[in-house]
């Protein structure tokens, strides 16, 4: 055991279930089930994390009442005995990896979408789910559940828990966070009933207490029950106060639950100036809520709490996690996205190999793909996540090759890393004096600092895999041919585009601004994609008067929904002027001429004009070599990839093809 983290790596108990350490994999929807059934992709996903050293695995949100309770088409289901064999396999692979197995059971309630369930959603009350950039999309008004329907759903939860026990799980987690039915009953805004299930705190938690009581009747006292609880629901549509949260924790403790995973919920259509995207979240950001609940339980009961509180929130940093445990802030640590990025995270910590941990950069693509687009989750760091069958096996090559990779961005480094791990002799070249490619620019705008964590990871992986690195080296067709490679991978990135308009020579490109180029007081940014908007915020924070001109009708449309809403909220807070459906026609010494879609022409003052109108794939090296090299690949931005998760996946795929 790594002596730097004696508390994090020491055993813990949830009820009568003993964990090998104090880490818990949080439930995170992957949307990779087939008609609700466990498949190979699901098995491999959880087996890898269990083998990776985590103390307990909480399997993702699983529906107790399909189709009414589904939230995605790839959601796991456990509302019938036919799902038990697959769940038995799943619990088995988790146990084989040395972790304890819990199943998160849930009903989506008013958060369900007609396109998925085929009918009107249901909820505690006929109150539509408000728009939230943190949780999902605005939804239609649900049908209010009758008391008999509520009691039937309570029984479905309990029967789901019994099936989980029959399948070999050590316990279940009742989902009461986010836009799911569990939180909806607890919220005074979502639940406006006046009967036995609403009207006050005591009635609003009745749904949960009935479920817990029935699970105990069916499954016994040794079967562990965790509740994942929003102890506060913020925003104008939020209906759970901190005092409500303390009361709910008190009642759950009295009901005999074995642990509470403590989180917060939020409903807000717009992001304020101080709202941070996940790419800037602090480590262990939610553990303080555990301390509040602990104090509240003591003040309300006169006694110390009797059950463990599980805290986390970007808890992949073992230093921060150990500190939270040492201070007594929480009792166990839940880790979410960190385990998606690095399945063997806990083993690496235990072995003192923290510098090898693949970071979560907080891009939000995992959530965006799964909830906004109804697809499997993806990861900007981990190429394997939810791709195919989640097979992490890297097969040794049967024939060793000399592989040359040109471009040390995320795609090129991933290709080089995998090829070297397979046994190839790999060299990588980059004209820049550092690895990282576009990441070195992407981490410069405000609140994007976690993207910078990729660079040291990439550097370390090249070192560990034995790749020969040549930085600050521009290679030509002749240079490559002189190396006599067996295979070439081109990952040469992009070149920024400049518009062919009058006065274009007076403009600078966004890249140069992010790297520190001086600008005047009045700045016009041409292009309102993610780069243009982030550059505008970068400048606005420096006190510049910034305007954005974008031809499309929306801004930052190539950004995940949560990040987009926060970014636009920041721009509004900085008084950035935003002109959509507009086109710059002319740049002069002190202004730009703009025409909108209605044909109206107006002028904006501009000491500096910044082009952020996209990039063109740099394919010249690939084009010159494709008829000269038998095995050649073009990947990443030079292949028009666009986003980090796809670039990483292309690199991983090509590395395995070599």
Image: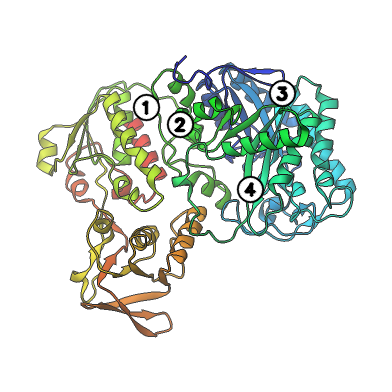
Q: Which disc number belongs to residue 317?
A: 2
Q: Earlier in the sequence, mark 1 or mark 3?
A: 3
Q: Is residue 283 left or right of residue 473?
A: right
User: Mark 1 packing: few (<14 Cα in 10 Å), some, or many (20+)?
Assistant: some
Q: Is residue 245 left or right of residue 495?
A: right
Q: Earlier in the sequence, mark 2 or mark 3?
A: 3
| Residue 144 lies in quadrant | bottom right
Q: Position of residue 299 (x, y in %)?
A: 73, 36
- Distance of mark 4 from mark 1, alpha carbons? 33 Å
- The residue sitting at 63% across, 25% down in the picture is 90
User: Mark 4 packing: few (<14 Cα in 10 Å), some, or many (20+)?
Assistant: many
Q: Earlier in the sequence, mark 4 or mark 3?
A: 3
Q: Earlier in the sequence, mark 1 or mark 2?
A: 2
Q: Which residue is mark 1?
A: 356
Q: Which disc number belongs to residue 256?
A: none
Residue 16 or residue 496, whichever sits in front: 16
- Distance of mark 1 from mark 3, alpha carbons? 35 Å
Q: Earlier in the sequence, mark 4 or mark 1?
A: 4
Badge 2 element: loop
Residue 435 or residue 476, whichever sits in front: 435
Image quadrant for the C terminus? Answer: top left
CB under 8 Å between discs 1 and 3: no
Q: Position of residue 170 (x, y in %)?
A: 69, 22
Q: Which disc number belongs to residue 265?
A: 4
Residue 184 or residue 529, whichever sits in front: 184
Q: Which residue is mark 3?
A: 167
């Amino acid at each position: 055991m790594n002596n730097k983290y004696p508390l994090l790596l020491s055993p813990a108990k949830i009820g009568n279930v003993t964990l090998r350490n104090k880490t818990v994999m949080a439930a995170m929807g992957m949307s990779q089930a087939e008609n609700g059934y466990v498949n190979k992709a699901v098995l491999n996903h959880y087996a890898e994390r269990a083998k990776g050293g985590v103390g307990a695995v909480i399997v993702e949100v699983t529906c107790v009442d399909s189709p009414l309770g589904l939230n995605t088409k790839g959601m796991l289901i456990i509302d019938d005995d036919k799902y038990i064999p697959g769940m038995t396999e799943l619990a088995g692979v988790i146990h084989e990896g040395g972790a304890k197995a819990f199943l998160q059971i849930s009903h989506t309630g008013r958060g369900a979408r007609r396109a998925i369930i085929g009918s009107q959603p249901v909820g505690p009350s006929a109150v539509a789910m408000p728009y939230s950039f943190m949780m999902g999309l605005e939804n239609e008004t649900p049908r209010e559940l009758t008391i008999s329907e509520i009691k039937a759903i309570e029984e479905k939860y309990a029967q789901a828990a019994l099936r989980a026990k029959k399948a070999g799980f050590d316990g279940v987690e009742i989902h009461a966070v986010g836009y799911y039915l569990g939180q909806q009953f607890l919220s005074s805004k979502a639940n406006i009933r006046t009967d036995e299930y609403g009207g006050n705190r005591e009635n609003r938690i009745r749904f949960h207490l009935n479920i817990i009581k029935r699970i105990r009747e069916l499954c016994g006292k040794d079967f562990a029950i965790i509740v994942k609880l929003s102890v506060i629901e913020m925003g104008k549509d939020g209906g759970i106060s901190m005092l409500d949260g303390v009361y709910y924790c008190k009642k759950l403790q009295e009901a005999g639950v074995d642990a509470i995973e403590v989180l917060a919920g939020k409903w807000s259509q717009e992001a304020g100036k101080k709202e941070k995207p996940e790419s800037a979240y602090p480590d262990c950001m939610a553990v303080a809520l555990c301390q509040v609940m602990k104090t509240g339980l003591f003040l309300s009961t006169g006694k110390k709490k009797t059950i463990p509180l599980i805290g986390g929130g970007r808890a992949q940093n073992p230093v921060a996690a150990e500190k939270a445990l040492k201070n007594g802030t929480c009792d166990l640590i839940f880790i979410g996205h960190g385990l998606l990025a690095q399945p063997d995270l806990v083993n690496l910590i235990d072995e003192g190999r923290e510098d090898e941990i693949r970071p979560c950069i907080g891009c939000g693509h995992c959530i965006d793909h799964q909830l906004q687009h109804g697809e499997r989750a993806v990861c900007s760091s981990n190429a394997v996540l939810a791709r195919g069958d989640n097979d992490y096996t890297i097969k040794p090559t049967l024939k060793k090759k000399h592989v040359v990779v040109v471009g040390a961005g995320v795609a090129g480094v991933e290709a080089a890393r995998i090829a070297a791990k397979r046994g190839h002799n790999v060299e990588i070249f980059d004209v820049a004096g550092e690895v990282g490619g576009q990441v070195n620019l992407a981490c410069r705008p405000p609140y994007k600092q976690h993207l910078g964590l990729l660079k040291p990871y990439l550097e370390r992986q090249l070192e560990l895999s034995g790749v020969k690195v040549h930085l600050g080296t521009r290679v030509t067709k002749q240079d490559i041919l002189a190396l006599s490679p067996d295979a070439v991978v081109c990952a040469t990135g992009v070149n920024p585009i400049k518009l062919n308009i009058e006065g274009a020579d007076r403009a600078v490109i966004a890249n140069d601004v992010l790297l520190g180029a001086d600008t005047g007081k009045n700045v016009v940014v041409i292009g309102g994609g993610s780069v243009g908007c982030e550059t505008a915020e970068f400048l606005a924070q420096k006190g510049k008067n910034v305007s954005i001109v974008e031809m499309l009708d929306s801004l930052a449309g190539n950004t995940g929904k949560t990040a987009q809403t926060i970014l636009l909220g920041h721009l509004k807070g900085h008084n950035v002027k935003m002109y959509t459906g507009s086109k710059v026609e002319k740049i002069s010494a002190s202004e730009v001429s703009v025409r909108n879609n209605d044909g109206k022409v107006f002028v904006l003052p501009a000491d500096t004009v910044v082009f952020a109108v996209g990039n063109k794939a740099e394919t010249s090296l690939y084009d010159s070599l494709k008829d000269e090299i038998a095995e050649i690949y073009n990947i990443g931005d030079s292949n028009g990839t666009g986003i980090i998760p796809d670039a990483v996946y292309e690199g991983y795929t090509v590395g395995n093809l070599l």
